[in-house]
């Protein structure tokens, strides 16, 4: 997903038509990658459980209860397009929410090597910096047409809140790198 954001940024900067197409391209890329990640994640989790390398932990009780409440709420309120696919600017429906908790967290929990998690976190920070630099460039020069026509600063995202969540995670990772990193990771932080 980090690389998808980098791809969207590169499209936004290099392709003039992205001002009109960004929304559609982002949604299509996200959907394809999300289904690929979920499919691969389910396969990974099944193999990990079969090999007894992934266990149900005490904290999973809370996420299981949350997933059950999501399902119960959906059955009570009924299925609709928005329930399944999410609101039109986000496209995160019930199945995505369940996948975030069960698949994304399950796969993430199985990362054991610090080098792998460090690579992912560093990529997140670097891509966040590139998106931030592009947003600053646009604020100063108005040079990234795909960033225009939105209510607030949101860069490659469609909503300032989404960009805010993304930046919050980058800031927290950066602080951790700066405080606890050594050499290169402290500088990246």
Image: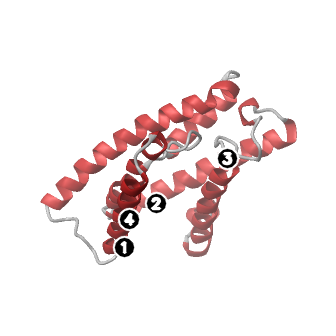
- Residue 187, given in percent of the width and then of the height, sits at 64, 63
- The extreme right residue here reads 140
Count of marks, rendered view: 4
- For the residue carrying disc 2, how many other residues have a C-alpha within 10 Å: few (<14), some (14-19), or many (20+)? few
Measured Cα–Cα span from mark 4 to mark 1: 10 Å
Name the residue at 36% across, 73% down.
62
Measured Cα–Cα span from mark 3 to mark 2: 28 Å
- Residue 43, given in percent of the width and then of the height, sits at 23, 48
Looking at the rendered structure, which numbered label has been put on residue 23? none
- Residue 41, given in percent of the width and then of the height, sits at 30, 49
In front: label 4 or label 3: 4
Measured Cα–Cα span from mark 4 to mark 3: 27 Å
Give the quarter of the image for residue 60: bottom left
Which secondary structure lies at badge 1? helix
Measured Cα–Cα span from mark 4 to mark 2: 34 Å
Q: What residue is disc 1 on?
A: 62
Q: What residue is disc 4 on?
A: 69
Is tag 1's residue or tag 2's residue first in the polypeptide sequence?
A: 1
Q: Is residue 143 left or right of residue 39?
A: right
Which secondary structure lies at badge 4? helix
Which secondary structure lies at badge 2? helix
- The extreme bottom residue here reads 58
- Residue 183, given in percent of the width and then of the height, sits at 58, 67
Measured Cα–Cα span from mark 3 to mark 1: 29 Å
Is tag 4's residue or tag 3's residue first in the polypeptide sequence?
A: 4
In front: label 1 or label 2: 1
In front: label 4 or label 1: 4
Is tag 4's residue or tag 2's residue first in the polypeptide sequence?
A: 4
Looking at the rendered structure, which numbered label has been put on residue 118? 2
């Amino acid at each position: 997903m980090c690389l998808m954001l980098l791809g969207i940024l590169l499209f936004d900067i290099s392709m003039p038509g992205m001002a009109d197409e960004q929304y559609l391209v982002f949604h299509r890329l996200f959907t394809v990658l999300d289904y690929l990640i979920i499919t691969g994640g389910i396969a990974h989790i099944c193999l990990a459980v079969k090999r007894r390398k992934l266990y149900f932990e005490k904290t999973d009780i809370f996420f299981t209860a949350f997933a059950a409440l999501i399902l119960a709420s959906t059955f009570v309120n009924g299925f609709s397009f928005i329930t399944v696919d999410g609101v039109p600017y986000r496209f995160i429906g019930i199945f995505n929410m369940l996948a975030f908790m069960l698949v994304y967290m399950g796969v993430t929990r199985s990362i054991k090597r610090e080098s792998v998690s460090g690579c992912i976190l560093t990529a997140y920070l670097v891509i966040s910096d590139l998106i931030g630099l592009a947003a600053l460039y646009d604020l100063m020069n108005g040079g990234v047409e795909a960033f225009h026509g939105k209510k607030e600063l949101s860069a490659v995202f469609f909503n300032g809140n989404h960009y805010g969540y993304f930046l919050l995670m980058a800031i927290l990772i950066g602080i951790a790198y700066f405080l606890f990193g050594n050499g290169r990771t402290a500088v990246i932080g």
